[in-house]
Amino acid sequence: MKMLAGTILGSFQEKNPACHSSMWETVLLFSRTFPDSWTTVNVHKTVISRLWNFLKNGCFGSQKVSYPALVLFLEIVPSKSITGDKFFLDFFRSLWEGRHVSFSSNTDRHAFFLAVEECFIWAIRNASRYCVGPEAIYLFQHTLVDEVLLGFLWPEYLLAASSKNQDSAFSTSTLDQSKNGIQSNHKEPREALNSKHSMDYEESLGKCIVKILSGIQRLDNNLFLVFSSKFQADIFDIFHQTEYSSQNVQWVVKFILLLDKHAVRNGEIWPLLDLIGPTLQKSFPVIGTLDSPDAVTVIVTAVSVFGPRQITQQIMCIGLGAEEFLKSFIETIIPWSLKKFSPSTSARLDLLLALLDDECFSEQWDAVIRYLVIQEKVSFNPGTMDRNCISVLAILMEKVKERTKKSVHQSDQCEDWHHELLDLVAVYVVQAFPQFGDSDARFICAVLGGGTIDDKISFISRKTVTLIFEEVLRRLMTFMKDSTFAWVQDVCSLLFNGKKYSDWRLEPSNNLLEMAHFVLDILNGSLFCLNTIEAESELVQGILAAIFIIDWEFSCINVSEDKLHKEHIGETGSRLAFCEAVHAFRCKILDQFLRGFGVNNRKSLGTTLVQSVKCITFVDKFESDNFVSLCGQWTLDVFEIFCQDQVEEQQLLEQFLNKNDSWPLWVIPDGTGARLRTDNVSLSLNAPNNTKFIALVDKLISKIGFDRVVAGLISEASPSSTKDSLTDLGINKTHYSRPWLAAEILCTWKWLGGCVLDSFLPSFVIYMKNGDCGFSDSILNVLIDGALVHGSCSGLNLLQRASVDELEAVAEPFLRALLSVLSTFFQDNLWGNEKATSLFKLLVDKLYIGDNANLDCLKILPSIMNILVRPLSIGAEDRTNDLSDPYSESKLHNVTVDWLKRTVCFPSLSTWQSGEDMEDWLQLVISCFPVEVTERMQEIKPARYVFPAERAVLYELFQKQRHGASAVLNKLPLVQKLLSELMVISVAYCWEDFDEDDWKFVLHRLRFWIEAAVVMMEEVVENVNHTLTNGANDVNASLNEFESAVVISDPFLIELARNALVGFSLFCSLIGSQDKEHTGNLNHLGSEKWEIITDRIFEGILRLFFCTAASEAIANSCGHEASSIIASSRLGHRQFWESVASCVLQSSSHARDKAMKSIEIWGLSKGAISSLYALVFSCKPLPPLQYAAFVLLSTEPGAQLSFTCDTGKVSNDGILNNEDSFETSSAENVHLREELSYKLEKLPPRVLEMDLVAHERVNLLVAWCLLLEHMTSLPSSSPARERIIQYVQESTSSIILDCLFQHIPLELYMGSSSRKKDAELPAAVSEAARRAIATSSVSSSVQFLWPIGPEKMASLAGAVFGLMLHHLPAYVRGWFSDIRDRSASSAIEAFTKAWCSPTLISNELSQIKKASFADENFSVSVSKSANEVVATYTKDETGMDLVIHLPPSYPLRAVDVDCTRSLGITEVKRRKWLMSLMSFVRNQNGALAEAIRIWKSNFDKEFEGVEECPICYSVIHTVNHSMPRLACKTCKHKFHSACLYKWFSTSHKSTCPLCQSPF
């Protein structure tokens, strides 16, 4: 038995959990069967010590089996075998110590705590088994409670339930209750503690303690008081340690909730009566003095668990009756909860609300409100109201709102909380000033509700809500009226004018911003409350409109902030923060609010806002395009927010565009059409405002499209779609079409930041291309009617079709608008012959009223016919063309003949007096015979085909006017102008019928008109020159004098000269024509007398040209501004100066030479060449003039004068003689004019960082063009050309090549493959490079350079690079070899190989093949397929073959030279000759043929015995081709001067390189 007992009872050493179930069954069964077996073994050694180890190790993993068996095990342990108190203390310590390895799962944890609970209760209940007598039993039980429950269970719970358990601090009594228990916990790793102190662990531990307490309380209340005392002591300790109370009071709250969950809900009353009730009763006075929110939270939690009456009963020691409860609540709880505002106020208010009882709610709530709000104080003396009351009320009502949100029946709850004093206080707070503080807005928001879209909780009446928002509106209006922007004040006045709020007195206040922030806080917290007073539409819309306008002010301040004065910034800066807050409010909340806004109110508010924007444009005196953009953005924002579809958008646009007193100015909408405005409107008064509003409309068109703003179309796309939404022709035509608006914009013509030509017409054209829908016809009818009503002449030049830009000169708005539309639509081929025919028919029908002419129609018809005649004439030359309209041809022909005959019936112009309608008829005839002038007047020809009958009557008209003009000269300017125009069209259309007298009359009249302009322009030059020489010293005064000097005294002379130049150009084109059928008619024009008069005319034209050039050159001496004045003066007469330039290009060298000499003789401060340079480098270019100046500078006779070179002494063989000096710097050999050298030698600072179209960069490239053109004109072997090349190498910077490749798109060649297709490079660049090489000229690229643009600059750069490769290959190669960027180097080489090298190589080989070296000893053969040249030199019995190979990227890569055969030549000499040829061909800045010729000459000289230069080992210098002529006086060796100069410079001594004697 002893052995068996030892084995079974000592089995707790088994560590295999799989055996533990059988182990427990055996132990329990054996002990029950043989209870005396325990006496046979050493219990402590065999059983107890092993059990303790088993428990400390968490039962070795068998928690689910072992923990439930522990209480059964306690049952079978013989009481005599153990010492009661020690056994149980060691048992619980071992069990507790094993907890940290027991929690592998929640089930294990629950099993553990259930075992602790069961074992502890069992031990308490069975204390009598181990103790004798009541005292011993109680002592035993007390020890267990003290050591186990309070020793380590309770402290462990406090640690677990604290928010910061590692830093928590408890009383010494709490922490040191168990020396053996708690202290051991602190030795555990922190990870173990953290794992134990999870939420589940805390819950399980607390439940265990509650169950133990429940068991103890049922067993012996005295034992329970042990824990109760400890519980109260811990709470008091926490309350007194305020530093830690906020951290550790959580455990109290959690424990009360655990009591509720595991005891109170089970019907147990001991937690209230024996634990929480007594604790609160004792601690309530302490809590009242602590002012601790956490302490109050304990009471609130208790109330939530046990109920308001029960807790009040325990605290106040009263009964549960309603009267006693209500009395205690009113007399004690309310004063205590609502005392002065403090940190615990929020918690005390929570307690106050928690103590509200359903039965006594009305009385309690009334008592609370009346305690806070004394009606008499609010009603009669608001200033005495306690500020703390408002703060407390604000917090209280917020808590009430949160409580109400949790209620199922919110509306009923709101009614319960309503109190009349709340309305009174709300009105008082919102009207009081100054406010109480932040709590004011909190209170108002709390009682209003509406913080979110779902927040419908409000505690005040509808009337009070209305009063509050009226005050909000009042203060917003006051803020707006105080704005520094006049438009804000004006819009505010207009918004509320005539409404019930218009009589409000808005007095400014020193605390305006504080009031504004107050009302914004109210709106932030209660915006959706506005939905409850939607019936008050004026009020709601007023508030929302004010928000939008203040938001607009914010954006306006941001835009204008940089331009404001410091004082103004100070004024607006204080408002900026509030405006920014309003902006954030609108973006964050307002959009969401408006989505739920009523449809009618939303539309009304949208209308109000767009009318406000419109008001701004008509009342504010702004002059900023940025401000117009802002207004446009505001309008678009309104459309986006308030329009749910495009129909609503169109309706809002209608409201936006509706008429007022000053809008529209020209056309008024009339249903779906329009009518002219006929009332007496002061245009000067309303025009500025009208143009500002047009600017705003133009911004809208640019943003959302012509189709939506003007055409009023509604598409399938969304309302927020952009202007690109118009993508098909099937869009519905609606009644929102606005032809009147298009006509109004066209008539306005110019506005702030834009004009018809730049923005409106392009948008109109895009719309037309997508589908007209008949809209353009409506606009056209309006414009025609307006033009007829205002009947006025256009004043345009009717000889040629006026460009759209030139139409700006038309003064009458309707006619100008009509002409711009017609010109644009016909030029862009939007309209064709059919449309032109219908318009022509319409206008012809309107021309006659019975038998009389409609004079208004007659006045506008010439300018319209000037546009229509071309589309009407389509197909007239080919009668078989099916596309032509026979009706339109015959109609135009018949009508034109009729008009001509009617005009022929008038007397001659020489007898005409002003006021007769002959002028209009003659202008109408002239408009029917336009002259076509190509760009820059490169070609002038008739613009249409005319029938013989038309030409016959036109010639008859010319004859009549010629005879009349010959008899009597009428000097009226208009007569001269009409005669000049008639003369031009007669030359263009009737020249075949002219006889010699006709030509004589024409040429003399043309010369007369041109000479008159010459006299006037020479007077201008004299004035400019006088201003320079005798002008004021003051710069501004001088500029004013220049402006006065360039004023054209008689513009009619310019017009006459312009017409004369067109006529003379026609004459010159006829002379130059090689058409055989014309030869017979022009024989008489080839006589010498016509050549003389044409030369005289050309001389006059050249004098005109030099006049404007000299004026700019003279003014340029006074600075950039002065020259800009001269250049700008030409822009007003663009056609005239373009005609001058065109004729200059046709002039002969003889005429040019005479004109230049006359300028030099004139004696101006600037000569002819300086004038040309000033013109070509003009700051405000007129392209034809600049090109003409370029041509005159680069061709004879100007080329000789524009590059001044010192020729030096030249020998017969072309070798420069320079015996007296070894200084070979180009500074001594070539002198370029300062105008050119300055640009070539002194590059602008940071030229590579300049804009690609900068004026200085353009001038730099033009200067290089002039230099390269000059080099082209020089013979390849001339000394002058050699000196130019030397000048380029020594005086210019190769940075120019870097500049060129900033324009040429190299990125296309920066890839894995260097071969690129033609399409990948802009055609203009590659073609320019090839053309420059092929023609040896950049003239064509310069011709079309102006107006400057990136593509044109790229083309010019390509041409310059090509010509530099052609003329300066060694110079370019030197630059290329210095490039360190491999990718850039490869790209440049690829570009050169693709577009330049093929032409250059072909040219080089062709020149070598054609070259005649004329020597029996020397021969050259060319292989174009191999790109090779073989040079064979034989002399006596010696000879050698040298092969020159041109690489694919020639000349970027140097040529290769190889000797394939040598005869009778030493290796040293062979190598020297090879190196000599290589040096010549690689240093040659010109043709290879020339390099080979010079190399041959070098051989010849050597064979002749001429001594070679000891420095370069060559007879002829490889660069300047000079002979070695400078001899050393000691050793007699001769050197090249250039070699010797280089030797002196690099060695820093002046001794002979051979003998070292002084040179």
Image (cartoon, helix red, strand yellow):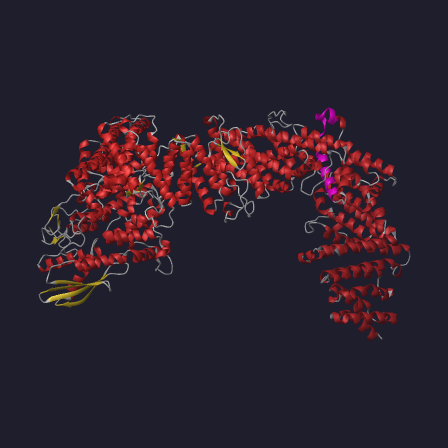
* Horizontal and vertical percent position of residue 492: 58, 29
Q: Is residue 1055 visible?
A: yes
Q: Residue at x 70, y 29 (%)?
A: 428
* Horizontal and vertical percent position of residue 1289: 23, 49
* Horizontal and vertical percent position of residue 211: 82, 55
Is 1070 above or below relative to 1442? above
- SS assignment for the magenta stretch, majority: helix
* Horizontal and vertical percent position of residue 1259: 29, 42
Whether the magenta-drawn stretch holds residue 390 is answered as: yes
Residue 252 left/right relative to 822: right
Q: Which residue occupies the foreground of this view, 1490 or 264?
A: 1490
Residue 790 left/right relative to 1142: right
Residue extent of the magenta highlight: 377-405
Residue 1374 left/right relative to 124: left
Q: Which residue occupies the foreground of this view, 1050 or 1180?
A: 1050
For the N terminus, the quadrant is bottom right
